[in-house]
Amino acid sequence: MNPEIQGEPDFSAGLYIHIPFCLRKCSYCNFFSITDITLQNEFINALLGEMLLAGNSELVFNTIYLGGGTPSLLEPAQTAKIISAAYKRFNISIAAEITMEVNPGTVTLARLKEFKKAGVNRINIGIQSFQDKNLNFLGRIHSAADAVFGIQTARDAGFDNIGLDLIYGLPEQSVESWTADLKKTVKFRPEHLSCYILTYEKGTPLQQARKNNSFCPLPERTVGTLFEITTCFLKENAYEQYEISNFALDAKIVGTDRRSRHNQKYWSNIPYIGLGPSAHSYIEPARWWNTSNLKEYIKSIAENRSPIMEKELLTREQQIMESIFLGMRTSEGIDIEKFEQRFGSGFYDQFGKTVYYLEKKGYLTAGQYRCALTPKGLLLHDSVTSMIVGNLP
Ligand code: SF4
């Protein structure tokens, strides 16, 4: 392994808990959630039941991630109940990173303080934009002023590990408009940033509106320019891009690694267990996921049945493809030694021809220890990695 690579993700597992409630569906969102929050208590009882069914695995966990949906809709006492049950049923380290996704439309100082008391030590706030026009287009429940209030209140509540989510590539978005959002973002000095390009997911109102020609999507070339601006601007402001969409404040400034410990597991072949409706789990070579129907989820737990809807075993070829696809999302890229130990074959023996061709074109760097995409390659991640794995025998 290259001795210069710092902060390797460790190999403890991650625990993901899906909270399937939202006050309103955002126009672009295809995550499973419902707006009927009357089932909250029944859901929590079912979740604790699922922990009984799935708990006590051999794994040691060092992250809990409360995602959704809108986990910040829960009462702090409910969150405390979930975290404490997770500690009882799973082998979770004391210093675990415990993240909760927060919607700015649900924030009060008292609630955030209580979430912190419940054990949450990292919060990820879904800001998306600091401009009301954009928030309306995305169908968010909060305003730009709520977004600012949410960040300031999280600091006041004592959180020293705050992540912000932003979306760009909206129709008619200009370089100036996106840069204004970025400038505002870095003023708050969040420890972590996720900047996602807007995608038009199947079955969402936004995709339907696009089909109806209600608006014109931003041209791909402009989206590419915004991606480059994001990377350069955040770099100038001391944010390290460690994955296509994810940036962490320089560890030298904050004194510690602020990359998302939990999310890194998804790109590094590290096991994770997902609880709650629609949640996915992975332990090499198996992947499985729960039903995406809340009533069915509650019913199956009440009947002492597993809520798992489907399970698949990845073939060796699928594992190779996935490790290249996921590894290449990160700025550190593929660890050649680990790849070769895992699959028992030489990475460059197998993929060298295409990889060296792509290196000449400036899309990646092919080193002795690592093979990683360049900034130009990251923007075209899907096409570049498809070219590499297209070479699988
Ligand atoms: S708040 Fe989040 S999970 Fe809920 S609809 Fe909006 S984007 Fe989806």
Image (tube, helix red, strand yellow):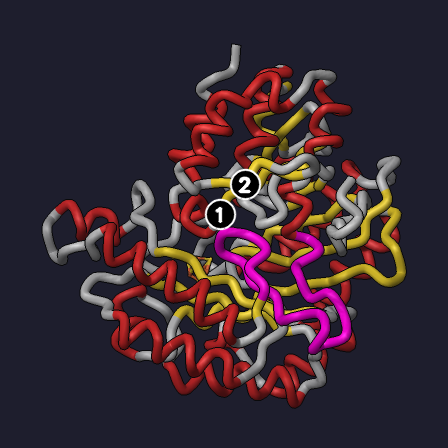
Q: Secondary structure at mark 2?
A: strand
Residue placed furthest toward the front: 360
Q: Which mark is residue 365?
A: 2
Residue type, mark 2 in image: Thr
> x and y percent of residue 285 in the render?
69, 23
Residue type, mark 1 in image: Thr
**Between disc 1 and disc 2, whose residue precedes?**
2
250 in the magenta segment: yes
> x and y percent of residue 172 in the render?
18, 65
Looking at mark 1, is its residue's CB closer than 8 Å to ligand 1?
no
The magenta-colored residue range is: 240-262
Foreground pick, 194 / 128: 194
Count of numbered tags: 2
Q: Is residue 169 left or right of residue 119?
A: left
> x and y percent of residue 111 in the render?
64, 81
Residue under label 1, please give it.
374
Foreground pick, 353 / 104: 353
Looking at mark 2, is its residue's CB closer than 8 Å to ligand 1?
no
The residue drawn where x is 10% and y is 51% is 213
Dots 1 and 2: beta carbons under 8 Å? Answer: yes
Where is residue 80, by image quadrant? Answer: bottom right
The residue drawn where x is 66% and y is 59% is 260
Foreground pick, 380 / 95: 380
The residue drawn where x is 57% and y is 25% is 310
Q: Which mark is residue 50?
A: none
Residue placed furthest toward the left: 213
> x and y percent of residue 325 in the render?
53, 34
Bin the neighbour count of mark 2 within 10 Å (Cα to Cα): few under 14, some 14-19, many 20 and up: some
